[in-house]
Image: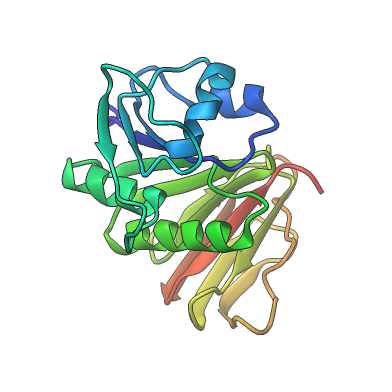
Amino acid sequence: MQKRRCVIIGAAPIQDMERIRALIRKEDYLVVCDGGLYHLEGLGIKSDLIIGDFDSHPRPETSVEMITLPHEKDDTDTAFAAKECMRRGFDHFLLLGVIGLRMDHSLGNLGVLQMLFHAGKEAVIADDYGEMQMVGSRPALVDSCFPYFSLLAISGKASGVNVRNALYPLRNAEIFPDVPLGVSNEPLPGKTAEISVAEGELLLLRILNA
């Protein structure tokens, strides 16, 4: 039986509502962060928990559980939501509306993805263009429905990198932050690419469009 997943929805733009809506399961626990409230109608969902300092959306009048944060704080709304949901026992996370035009917020949310990974959680960021997740010793897969994928070392060297069933396979390779060796690979037609890392970690981007 699949464990219940926590979906955290942020305020970054979502253009392909149909694609993002299809990623949400009926049994998901839905956490909406501040400006993410603007996405509820387009996604056709209702939240289980609302978190925010409400600097980008008015504080709603609702019976839904709400945690109001101060404007001056160390955590972003998304980071607080991830920590709160870990505290509530969730092990599986999907982050939506967290990658957008604000590069600082986007990079900060990649940090949230890393935080969840380091805590031993399964976490994915999805946007209009694909998906992102951290990869370590546990193999990650890229189905051929994603025509491209990239591997980036965003927190230091990754070694013992193996990529199978891909146009550009790797065996026991090293990937460094300043050498974009893993950018723009492709699963072989009809195959599922497999990625693993012996030491360190990589950011895997599954890309829907060129």
Residue depicted at x 74% and y 45%:
147
Left or right: 43 with respect to 71?
Answer: right
In the picture, residue 20 is in which quadrant?
A: top right
Q: Where residue 5 sits: x, y (%)?
A: 33, 33
The way the protein has been coloured in the rendering is: rainbow
Q: Where residue 36 sits: x, y (%)?
A: 49, 34
Q: Is 201 placed above or below 148 here?
A: below
Toward the viewer: 10 or 96?
Answer: 10
Q: Residue furthest left?
A: 88
In the picture, residue 97 is in which quadrant?
A: top right
Q: Is 46 placed above or below 123 here?
A: above
Q: Is 8 placed above or below 21 here?
A: below
Residue depicted at x 45% and y 31%:
58
Residue depicted at x 59% and y 43%:
12
Q: Residue furthest right?
A: 210
Q: Where residue 61 sits: x, y (%)?
A: 34, 20
In the picture, residue 4 is in which quadrant?
A: top left
Residue 23 in sight from this viewpoint: no
Which image quarter is the N terminus in? top left
Q: Where residue 124 sits: x, y (%)?
A: 47, 47
Q: Is 57 placed above or below 73 here?
A: above
Residue depicted at x 28% and y 21%:
64
